Amino acid sequence: MESENRVIKDRKGKAGRVIFSAVIYFFLTVWALFVLFPFYWMILSSVKSYSAYNGEYIPTFFTLSPTLENYREAFTAVPLAGYFLNTLIFTLATTALMLLVTVFAAYAFARLSFPGKDLLFSFFLSLMMIPTELVIITNFQTITYWGMRNTFWGLILPSVTSVFYIYLLKENFEQVPDELYKAAKVDGTSDLKYLFKVMIPVCRPTIVTVTILKIIECWNSYVWPRLITDDKAYFLVSNGIQEIRENGFGRENVPAMMAAVVVISVPLIILFLVFRKKIMEGVSRGGTKG
């Protein structure tokens, strides 16, 4: 009798877990559909002809006559390829300089000893409380005074530091046992050599994560490039969208606009899908001590 009751309880428990899992997956599926629908609508609109799109009094969720004409227009109506090249230069240069600054700053706060280090780092963290918009005017005046408007250096310099990335990498550096550092110093290893031979290889997942997040941030950058450049020769893809809308396709040619947005979004989507595990691993390692 006792065994039968135990079996019944086990079955009820399994049934409850199955029902709970089914409900969770149902809501996750519904949420995923809500999140992915804008991307589906963007791609769908980009393969509809201008006449077909404007002729739909009631929007349809599929098309029987897809066309790639909108993608051809995206590269011919405006210099979209040039915007891509500018964005690539800006992204690579900014990310490289940011990594250099971030790695050295994080290492200094994590391993070196100097007077006022904790106070300085606390002050450094307090800068995260200041909204980016509040320093844009100061950056604009500084870059203008230096004569760097409509230059790549004017685009790049205000973006080469990040308090959050320095904090994230510092926390990761501090997880490396102090014994390794002391042993290296006994062997006569310099701090620079220890950084490149030990710290960076051990903390590679977090560094990869910071790199990917910075690339995404640079690729999506809009406000600062729009403010500091009014020369189309230095437009980025995010700013080029507005130029496309105003001078390329016109405000009413939505399918062509959507095609341009798809072309601009694809590199970031591929980057995230390829490195999503690295991003999650680096963030979790950077925020967990011990």
Image (cartoon, rainbow, N blue to C red):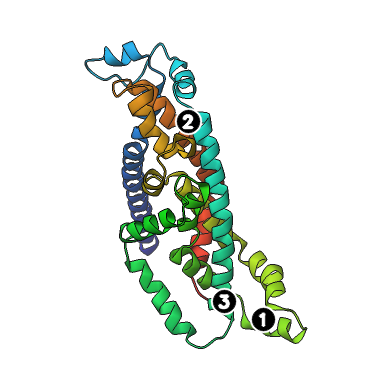
Residue depicted at 55% across the width and 62% down the height:
206
Mark 1 falls on what kind of element?
A: helix
Give coordinates of residue 56: x percent, y percent. Answer: 26, 14
- What amino acid type should be assigned to the residue bearing mark 1? Tyr
Label 3: which residue?
108
Label 1: which residue?
181
Q: Mark 2 or 3 closer to N-term? A: 3
- What amino acid type should be assigned to the residue bearing mark 3? Ala
Task: Tell me the CA gap for discs 2 and 3.
Answer: 41 Å
- What amino acid type should be assigned to the residue bearing mark 2? Val
Label 2: which residue?
263
Task: Tell me the CA gap for discs 2 and 1.
Answer: 47 Å
Q: From the viewer's perspective, is residue 43 above or below residue 124?
A: above
How crowded pointer 1 is (Cα within 10 Å; few <14, some 14-19, many 20+) is rated as some
Mark nearer the viewer, 1 or 3? 3
Q: Residue furthest left?
A: 57
How crowded pointer 2 is (Cα within 10 Å; few <14, some 14-19, many 20+) is rated as some
Horizontal side of residue 133 vs 188, given as left or right: left
Q: Mark 2 or 1 closer to N-term? A: 1
Q: Quadrant of the N terminus?
A: bottom left
Give coordinates of residue 257: x percent, y percent. Answer: 37, 26
- From the viewer's side, name the closer residue of 40 and 42: 42
